[in-house]
Every structure is written in C-alpha cells, then in structure tokens.
Image (spheres, grey):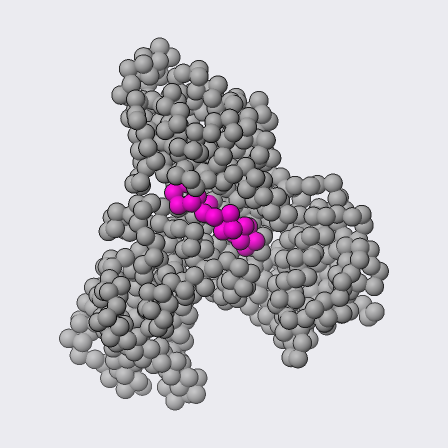
Amino acid sequence: MKRLMRTRYQLPRNICMAVTATCLGLACFAQTPSKNSLMPQPSKLTTLTGDLPVTDHLRISIQGPKDALLQNGAQRMIRRIERQTGLQLDQAENNDEGALIKIDVSDHTVRRPYEGVNESYTLDIHEGSARLHAATDFGALHGMETLLQLVQPNGGGYILPAVYIEDAPRFSWRGLLLDPGRHFLSVANILRTLDAMAVVKMNVLHLHLTEDQGFRIESNRFPKLQELGSEGQYYTQEEVKEIIEYATERGVRVVPEFDMPGHSTTWLIGYPELASAPGPYQVEHTNGVKNAAIDPTRESTYQFLDSFIGEMITLFPDEFIHIGGDESNGKDWLNNPAIMLFMHQHNMKTTGDLQAYFNERVQKILLKYHRRMVGWDEILQPDLSQEVVVQNWHGNEFLVNSARLGHLGILSGPYYLDHNYSAAEMYTADPVPSTNDLLAEQERRILGGEACMWGEQVDSYTVDSRIWPRTAAIAERFWSPASVRDTKDMYRRLAIMSRRLDALGVTHISNPQRGLRAISEGYPSALEVLSSVVQPVDFGERYKEQRTSPLTPMTNVIDFTVPDPLSRNEFAQSVAAYLQSSKRPGSSEHAADRALLERTFNAWAAAALDISVQSATNPRLKSIATRRSQLLQLASLGLQAMAHIESQETPADSWLTAQESLVRECAQPQELLDFVVLEPLRDLIRATSSRTTN
Ligand code: ACM
C-alpha cells in the first residue's frame, strides 16, 4: 500500500494551527476538490494527497479485546455510511487484518464518560486505508463522527479524503439543557437529541426534571411526587435507565436537575409537609416565578431530601447533581412566622442567607452520596463551598467572579436558545473570552458551557427546530480552538450540518415543513417563503403578546418559523454580492447576482399574494395578515431599489423617506414574528443614493 507523503504534518503546533485556519472554507485537499465541512472543526487537520474510496468492500474493524460500546458505535457508523451512500458495506470481524479502516483504543476499561475523561483521538486516512486511534472509547466515538462527516461524493463514487487529524476538546463540559418540566418531551425526543449531540461532540445532557408545571421523574420512595405532580407525564425509572444507557453509548453524561428550594410547586402537592405555606398546591398552568418554596428550617425536609437523593443516585451515575437554586423569591418564607423566627435565631438577615444555609445542608447530603453539587448562579454566596459548580445564566461577570472565588463554572447566559439569538451571536460568545483578566489557574476552572432549551414555548414537536442547527455552532465554540471563529465559514458548514442532522432524525427541517403544510391545508410553498424572511419573536415578547402558558397550543405559524433561519444569512450574502458586483454593472457576475435577487423579491411578492388568496378561506392565515402585506411591500421596495441602482438614478427624497419609514414599521413586533431581512434591505436603500455615476 502506497504510503502518502504528509504535507505540513511536521510543522510545530502553532504553525499547524495557522495552516488549519487558512484551510477553512477552501478546497484544501490536494487531489480531490473536497471542502472542509467538519463541524466542530478539529484542533489540528493536515491535508494529504489521495483518498480512500468508500465502496461496498470497505470493511471496518475494531482491534483489540471485545468491547461492546465500541462495537456498537462502529455498527452505527457503518449503518450511517450505508444510509449516506446507498452502499452495502462488507461485514468485518474484530481484529480483521484486511479491514481498510481499523479502530483501536488504548484503554478499554473506561465504561462511562465522566467530567474530564480523555476524549482525544487521531484519525489518519491515506490512500487505501485509515486508522482511528483514541485513548478511550469516548475519543473513538468522536473520531467516528469526524470520519462520517468526511465521507463525500467524488465523481462517480464516494471517498474519504486523505487527512491527518489530531483532535481534542477545548472544554470538558459541552452541555445542552432540556426542560421537560414545562412541556413534557417524549423519550423518543430525548434519544434523537442525544444522537444529534453526539454528532457535534457535545457530552452533557442536563435534564431539568422538576418544575412548578411538572414533576417528571418516578420516585418509588415518594410516589406522590409523580402521581400528583405530573398529570401522568413523567419518565419511569426504566425509561431513565434507557436514556442514560443510550447517552453513555454516545459518550454523553446525563446530569439531572431537581430544582429547589423554589420552582418546587410539584413537590408540595403530594408532600405539603415540605412547604413553607399552607397550600393547597396544584400543578401550575401558568409560567413565571412562583412563591412556592421548600421549607429550609425543618429537619424533616433534609430527611426527605436525603432519602430522595439516595434513590436518585441509584439511577443517575454521574458525579454531578444540579439543585437549581434559581429564582427563589423568598416570599413564602417571609410570610411564615416560624421561618422568620428561625432566621432571627440563626442571625440570618436576608432570605439569601437562608437559601445559603439550605444549599449547605443539601450539599452535605450530596457529599454523603459522593456527588458534587451544581447550581444556578443565584447560589453564589460568600461561604459557598468551593466544591460547588456554578452555572451562569446572568451576566458573564457571575462566571468570572465564581472562578475567582475558586468555583468551577459553566457559561449559559449567551446560549439561551429561547431568546432566539442568531447562530453568529452565540458562536461569538466565548466561555473564556480573550479579554478576560483571570489568572491561568482561574481560567481553567471554567469547565465550558451549556446551551439551554427552556420549555415554556416549545413542545415535543417544535423543540428540535429551536435547538438545531444553531446548537451545532455553539458546540463548535465549546470543542474547537478559540481561533476558529470565522462566522461566514461557520454558516457555510452549518447549512451542511443542518441537512445531516435532519437526515439523522432530528426534525428541525421536517417538522416546520409539516406544520406549514398542515396550516396551509396542503399548499405550504407561500408560507415557506414567508418563513424564510421571519423568525419567532423572542421569549419575552411572545410572553407579553400571547401570555404563553403550558396550555398554549404550539401549532401556529410562529411555531413553524425558526430562529435565525439559514435563509437570513443567504439573503444578506446575496444583497452584499449584488451591491459589490453593481460596481461592475456590465459584468456577467453582476447579471447573475441581479437575476438571483430579482427572483427572490418576485418570490416574496408571489407568496404574499398567494397567502392573501388563501386567507379568504383559511382562518388560520388571518393571524399573519399584517406580516403578509408587509412582505409584499418589502418585495416592492427591493425591486424598486434595484431599479434605481441599475439605472444609476438617485431616487427622490420622498421615495427614500417612504422606504425608510416602511422598514421602521416592519421592525416593530407584530403577529409574533420578526423580519430577519431588514438590515440588507436598509443597505439596498442606502445604495440607491450613495452611488456615484462615473
Ligand atoms: C433560569 O433561567 N431560571 C436558570
């Protein structure tokens, strides 16, 4: 077998990184015109000449002792190559010397992922064969995902381009929070989320299991928790075991959150003796911060929690348990004379002091069970044990402060998916920004970050379209070197990734399509055009306009539009390209850019008219009457602006004023939808008058 010459491999690490960076977005494999579409980007990628053909004779074999976790991972990879290529691959035995792809792992004894486990791997693909090597099974699983992303068509067949990759995560905690507390999420939903997390090398699933709106886990010791607190929607212990096993097989840890002392209504329905007020309590059907709180002053509270946590640790093997601690407003404590007396006797001045006492007691219970406590940043009090991990959701300064005080920390504030930040905004937010003034040892305390998918405004059907594909960009921030930050290239790869994830089974593309098909009674194309230029309003605005509650149907147009649709970036790019090439009006490039943009505006106009016709008989379209008519006006704005640019005639001031006013009007919140195309339209308006004819 011909061994290929390595290009650049011998370079020192910093130079390699620079080479890697220049490769991004370019056709960087010497022989094959392939594109680097990996996401997350590996820490070191060297391109070689040649490739490994992917044919039905490709055999993939595990070297070394039998290892079911690795074997299952390899089987899944083979099935996915088959789905991707339509080929049927040959079966390989363990230690098959003739296999073209060999996988070997140094240490087969690590059976489940833990914080800080070695996740590194090397992938060496050259002409004729490939080797994937890792310290642990979990590194090998990441390497398999990289290998899968490298499979690509090459003329008549498929290949793996020759590359040498050395890869390891930048951060050890790369999480995603799911909130079945507000809207229950099916087990199938969680499993497909785990599949997608594995693709982008995320490794912590944080399950927010208890909320005012639902207690979602079965307890045998305290069955009234789920019986009275879940309205029948909870995970049985068997289902929890299934989720954890599925996660482990994909290198993902499951960290449960039992939110206390606030957000705790559903504990108190069956066990009112835990409560700080007389009750009675019932499952909440509204959102927002409630007064219900566990009573921290009674010894019986800690006996209960000891017993409950003692049961939960038999289910959740992870070292970390999240105790919430957020938004405990203290009102029910201040209204309870016995609690006030306790505070007085213990010299506690504020409810914050009482919560600090509660946290300390709960932490002792966790320590007894060899578990480490995680809590939201409200728990950060001067005496908080350094053992406790602080999860940021307020300003970044909380994370920085907690690292200074010696705590491990996780950044989440910038990654709240329900705030509908763009992928670019979240991609740019770094758990450890280069401008921070932490000492190196303090910086190391920042374990990573977590994307948070809160459940108030999503259900089991729509949740995927809020998580993906944006979370793939966040995953790259957590995995790849800090120097990987080219937003344009991120969007190029995100579009590819989005299709891959949907093909795998998450429904962020297919469910919105299905929803729009249902609303339009089978004629969705006009609504699809509208949904390409809007996104749902952010969490707070939707709450204000709609008073969303767990009972609000998540089946309206807003629910089938997506945050930061990829079309937003595509439109911005096509306007930028058009304006750029308009400096060369006669060029064929400009003719193409112009034709594309005109087609886009004509499609907007046609869609607006189509929706208008459909609205006459379809009551569900009435809710977007304003946005529909604005779409028509924006299409007209675009076409008129282009006509001015093409004719090189500066428009009248009255035209400019009218268009600017239209854009301002369109920027107002309306019908739960925000336009995402207004900035490029402003650029077009500006270009009509800033042009100089020469
Ligand atoms: C939170 O968003 N209440 C942690």
Residue 15 in the image: state x and y as whole percent: 64, 59
The residue at the point 44 percent across, 15 percent down is 299
Comparing 382 with 532, the one in front is: 532
- Name above or below for residue 420 compared with residue 604: above
**Lateral position of residue 339 relative to residue 670, left or right:** right
Specify start and end residues of the magenta stretch as a single range. Answer: 178-196
Comparing 438 with 450, the one in front is: 450
Residue 496 in the image: state x and y as whole percent: 53, 66
Residue 88, image quadrant: bottom right
Q: Examine the structure image and report whether residue 185 is included in the region drawn in magenta.
A: yes
**Lateral position of residue 169 relative to residue 233, left or right:** right
The residue at the point 74 percent across, 40 percent down is 109
Q: Examine the structure image and report whether residue 456 is included in the region drawn in magenta.
A: no
**Lateral position of residue 473 relative to residue 263, left or right:** right
Residue 674, image quadrant: bottom left
The residue at the point 39 percent across, 89 percent down is 586
Q: Is residue 78 visible?
A: yes
Q: Is residue 328 visible?
A: no
Comparing 666 with 527, the one in front is: 527
- Name above or below for residue 57 compared with residue 427: below
In the picture, the quarter occupied by the C terminus is bottom left
Of all residues, the one furthest to the bottom in this rendering is: 586
In the picture, the quarter occupied by the N terminus is bottom right
Residue 327 in the image: state x and y as whole percent: 35, 34
The residue at the point 43 percent across, 31 percent down is 225
Residue 609 in the image: state x and y as whole percent: 26, 76
- Name above or below for residue 685 compared with residue 220: below
